[in-house]
Amino acid sequence: MGDINYTSYKELKEQFVSGHQGSPAAEITLIYLGIACCVLLHNAGGVGYRKQWFHWLGDFLVLVLPGLSSVTFLSESKAIVIVTLLSLAVISLIISHQFNRTAPKPSASLLRQEFGNKLEFVSNFRAYALICTAICILAVDFNVFPRRFCKAETFGTGLMDTGVGLFIVANGIVSPESRNKEKVSSLKSSLLSSLPLIVLGLGRVVSTKGVNYQEHVTEYGVHWNFFFTVSAVKICSSLLLTILGNINLTGPAIILILSYQLFLTKLGLSEYLVLGADGQGGRVRFFDSNREGIVSCLGYLSLYFLAVELGKHIFNKERKTVGDWVPFLGVLGLLQAVLWCTMMWSETHVQQVSRRFANLSYIVWILALSVFLLFLLLLIDLFSHNQSFIFAKKKEEDVCLLSAVNYNGLLYFLLANVLTGLVNLSIDTLQLSTAQSMTILISYMGILSFVTLMLYKWKIRLKFW
């Protein structure tokens, strides 16, 4: 392309992902319900193969393809996808039960079963936070991806608005503070662990500016990006925890988000974030040019603190049996009901959900969605331990895709960004048919999954946080 044509194409791509209002929160919740159904089918024995290659292919078909389809060419048939997944899971359970008949055990015996130390529901939550993000960051550039799933411009609940929020929650849950691995992360160790993210953030800025890559400026700002937000939250949290000590973070988190919301709604901060210092949406000097990314870190910091407290409730109480986890399942069920009600109240009486601001409604929405998904994944794990049904028994050498993604989260996300950039620089994604778009998206997710599985098998890991 010539410079003029490429510039016009860049502007067209930016317009394609800008100015959207999102979709109903219920629709996004339905998508994540489908994801939980993928895990149920996987656990039910639908991917038990002797050959490792078939096992990997089965993982991809069961754990990735349904989610990809639900946000692209089957976006209007999500209920059908969910019913299909549930039906296949039931059929798989019936077949397994027929081939592995055992005398049914009394419920008391089932509740005394060992749950195990490895909390699969947490690992699966973290893995899917990355998989869903990986799907969306490339799919958004194709017409097959509905525009309502794009990030909302200012207010609204788009599917892509959940990405950074779920990532913050996932990392807060398994943070050193939540698992008491250390009382408080030192500022020095936080800086060192955040260094890869800062380098990646700088690399993204240089590369996007260098090749004149399309940018959605109102997402984070001119220079700011996801990597800077995550590293800023980590560093700021360590700094505050050094001051506060090892205390319950629920109070500080609530004070922080309510104070931040007060500035947004009563002291003109919302208007500044939208209109800038000149009142016309201009961007001058570093802070003003990146105002959304920098200021929203306050909201994400409160979200991280709340996720740390959620992680403490998961990890810091000894639970050995299925029966030990049942009360916690009830707590998650009650908590999500409270959070959904709080979200509706906040949207009505305070401010609509805004990922751009990371405001109170957004934080509560992400927490509600996170608890909802954790509830479903824990329920599936508890059900999987019911030996009245025979779930696929995995060999020690079997490599699960979700485990591989969870093992190498940063590398997975980095590779997804690189592949997304290569596709966008080499293909006019806006002109492709549905079949062509799906071929590219399936190939992209297939390559991403294969590389991640191989790295996991070879124990190659890029660790941070």
Image (cartoon, helix red, strand yellow):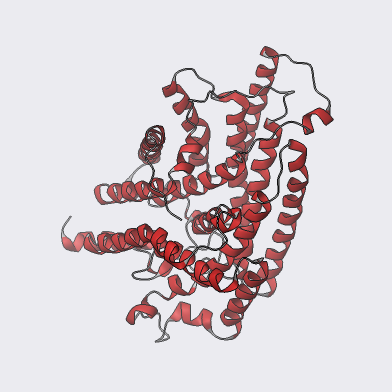
Q: Residue at the location (67% across, 51% down)? A: 316
Q: In terms of depth relative to the viewer, which is nearer, 122 or 158?
A: 122
- Give the percent coordinates (x, y) of residue 308: 60, 59
On the picture, is 462 further left or further right than 300?
left
Q: Among all residues in the image, which is located at the extreme left?
A: 2
Q: Residue at the location (70% across, 36% down)? A: 382
- In the rendered image, is residue 131 in sight? yes
Q: In terms of depth relative to the viewer, which is nearer, 167 or 3?
A: 167
User: How many marks can you see?
Assistant: 0
Q: Height in image: 142 above or below 283? A: above
Q: Residue at the location (69% across, 30% down)? A: 385
- Give the percent coordinates (x, y) of residue 120: 60, 39
- In the rendered image, is residue 356 in sight? no
- In the picture, residue 351 is in which quadrant? bottom right
Q: Height in image: 234 above or below 327? A: below
Instruction: Locate the N terminus and report the quarter of the image it occupies.
Output: bottom left
Q: In terms of depth relative to the viewer, which is nearer, 196 or 290?
A: 196
Q: Residue at the location (55% across, 57% down)? A: 182
Q: Height in image: 28 above or below 289? A: above
- Give the percent coordinates (x, y) of residue 119: 61, 41
Q: In terms of depth relative to the viewer, which is nearer, 445 or 122?
A: 122
- In the picture, residue 209 is in which quadrant? bottom left
On the picture, is 267 further left or further right than 324?
left
- Give the percent coordinates (x, y) of residue 171: 52, 54
